[in-house]
């Protein structure tokens, strides 16, 4: 490894460290990711001809520009997908589309509520995404469970169920979106083969946690009240809900029909939903219209979490630099040699690592480390890619800082790292391993 390559790797590792300890430094990880992007590619430009086989001079500059633009184009497909999906979910939420979820959850049995939370979170996260679903479920839990000791048990299950639900869906988690965008997994393949392992990884922890809950819940008049989050009629809210959630489900179908990238489908859904809501709000009376302006798509676009988008831009482009200089290929070959090509073990370790560090750069790195093969474990929908989707998603549940869902629930419910590690981590780990074993049985005896 050359000195320049080593310098790029060191810069990346330092940035990665600061991203991992964001809660300690209080520096937004998006800022660090952007610095990583600039620093790695700037170092790369010291001697680009060491990595790109081409002539010197203007031709070299053109080749470098083409390489960066190619990676940027690939990254942008993920970013546009995320921005579209975030806006759609926000629009449905702001217009009271998720009120029905709370009605379905209402029960006086603590254990009954736990199972309803488990399955509702699981399937919602497959349609929306694990982060958004976690926020929605915690908001609902606050209306249903007043005892904080009980609520943090439910909240911990929300983390596990959201991550498990996101793992089997091509639109349920950022990592599965990345793998789907890259074409290494298909919607039908990942749903059909990862659904049962993902359910197992959720059901086992849910059963263990149900043993800790006894008794019944009581509801105050305030808790029983349903909040109307929109100036629209009930029928209009239902139309927005079904267009939004149904549209997200339609995206994989649209891709299979047209063979266009997934972000085109998400923009189609956003365009349709935007048009419909504009028609609805255009007919509101003047006093209502002023308050309703905040619920229009044009206003919601200004409230998109740009720090998240910029974080993905920075980290994916920094990983692209490592791919360009050949480091990821060397690392992939090293892992294969060390573990003798055992992809169950390799992806299992990646899943454990994803509970410690962000799974986005881990998966991005794996995409760069391993080329897609025409047949075998590394083929499209092969064992390696499907296990990577499962392990990177479900593995994040083992520590509360291991996933975006865990971090947001940690902040909303004030769950400490130590409490989660002592009471929940081993339960999540058992579910994680059980899911891998279930997948092995599927691949050995069924598929």
Image: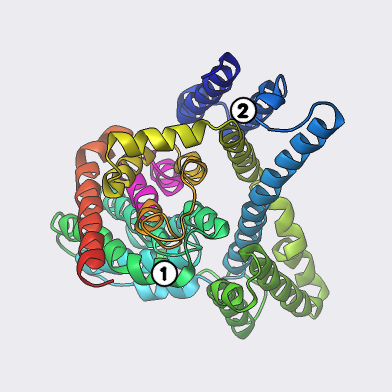
Q: Position of residue 425 (x, y in %)?
A: 24, 42
- CA gap between label 2 and label 1 equals 34 Å
> Does the magenta run of residues contain 404?
yes
Residue drawn at the location 39% of the way across and 51% of the way down = 388
Say which of 168 and 307 sits in front.
168
Question: Quadrant where the C terminus lies?
Answer: bottom left
By secondary structure, the bulk of the magenta-drawn segment is best described as helix
Residue drawn at the location 69% of the way across and 33% of the way down = 53
* Left or right: 354 as drawn, with respect to 321: left
Badge 1 element? helix
* Left or right: 41 as drawn, with respect to 256: right
Q: Which residues are magenta?
A: 390-413
The furthest residue to the bottom = 235
Q: Position of residue 296 (x, y in %)?
A: 73, 66
Asked if residue 220 can be seen in this view, the reply is no
Say which of 372 and 12 sits in front.
372
The furthest residue to the right = 58
Asked if residue 80 can be seen in this view, the reply is yes
Q: How many circles with numbers are drawn on the protein?
A: 2
Residue drawn at the location 40% of the way across and 36% of the way down = 333
Say which of 388 and 337 sits in front.
337
Q: Position of residue 252 (x, y in %)?
A: 55, 72
- Between tags 2 and 1, which lies in front? 1
> Does the magenta run of residues contain 349?
no
* Residue wearing tag 2: 36
Quarter-of-image position of residue 276: bottom right
Crowding at dot 2, Cα within 10 Å, few <14 / some 14-19 / many 20+, comes out as many
* Residue wearing tag 1: 189
């Amino acid at each position: 490894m050359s000195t320049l390559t080593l310098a790029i790797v060191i810069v990346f590792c330092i940035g990665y460290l600061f991203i991992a300890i964001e809660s300690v430094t209080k520096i937004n990880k998006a800022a660090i990711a952007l610095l990583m992007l600039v620093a790695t590619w700037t170092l790369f430009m010291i001697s680009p001809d060491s990595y790109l086989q081409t002539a010197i001079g203007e031709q070299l500059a053109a080749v470098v520009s083409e390489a960066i633009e190619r990676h940027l184009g690939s990254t942008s497909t993920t970013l546009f997908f995320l921005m579209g999906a975030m806006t759609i979910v926000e629009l449905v939420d702001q217009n009271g589309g998720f009120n029905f979820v709370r009605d379905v959850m209402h029960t006086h049995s603590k254990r009954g509520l736990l199972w309803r939370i488990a399955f509702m979170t699981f399937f919602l996260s497959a349609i929306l995404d694990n982060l958004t679903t976690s926020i929605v479920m915690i908001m609902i839990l606050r209306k249903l469970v007043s005892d904080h000791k009980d609520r943090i048990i439910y909240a911990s299950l929300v983390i596990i169920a959201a991550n498990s639900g996101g793992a089997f869906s091509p639109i349920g988690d950022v990592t599965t979106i990345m793998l789907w965008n890259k074409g290494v997994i298909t919607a039908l393949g990942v749903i059909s083969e990862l659904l049962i392992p993902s359910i197992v990884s959720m059901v086992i922890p849910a059963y263990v946690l149900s043993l800790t809950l006894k008794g019944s819940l009581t509801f105050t008049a305030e808790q029983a009240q349903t909040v109307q989050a929109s100036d629209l009629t009930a029928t209009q809210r239902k139309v927005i809900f079904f267009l939004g959630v149904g549209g997200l489900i339609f995206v994989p179908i649209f891709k299979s029909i047209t063979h266009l990238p997934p972000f085109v489908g998400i923009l189609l859904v956003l365009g349709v939903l935007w048009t419909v809501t504009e028609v609805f709000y255009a007919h509101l009376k003047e006093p209502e219209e002023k308050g309703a302006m905040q619920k229009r798509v044009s206003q919601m676009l200004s409230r998109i979490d740009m720090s998240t988008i910029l974080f993905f831009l920075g980290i994916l482009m920094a990983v692209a630099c490592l791919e360009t200089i050949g480091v990821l290929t060397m690392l992939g070959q090293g892992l294969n040699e060390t573990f003798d090509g055992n992809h169950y073990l390799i992806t299992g370790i990646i899943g454990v690592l994803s509970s410690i560090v962000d799974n986005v750069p881990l998966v991005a790195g794996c995409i760069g480390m391993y080329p897609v093969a025409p047949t075998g474990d590394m083929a499209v929908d092969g064992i390696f890619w499907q296990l990577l989707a499962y392990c990177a998603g479900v593995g994040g549940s083992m520590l509360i800082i291991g996933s975006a869902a865990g971090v947001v629930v940690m902040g909303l419910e004030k769950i400490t790292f130590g409490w989660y590690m002592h009471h929940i981590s081993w339960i999540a780990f058992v579910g994680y391993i059980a899911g891998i074993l279930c997948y092995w049985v599927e691949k050995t005896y069924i598929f």
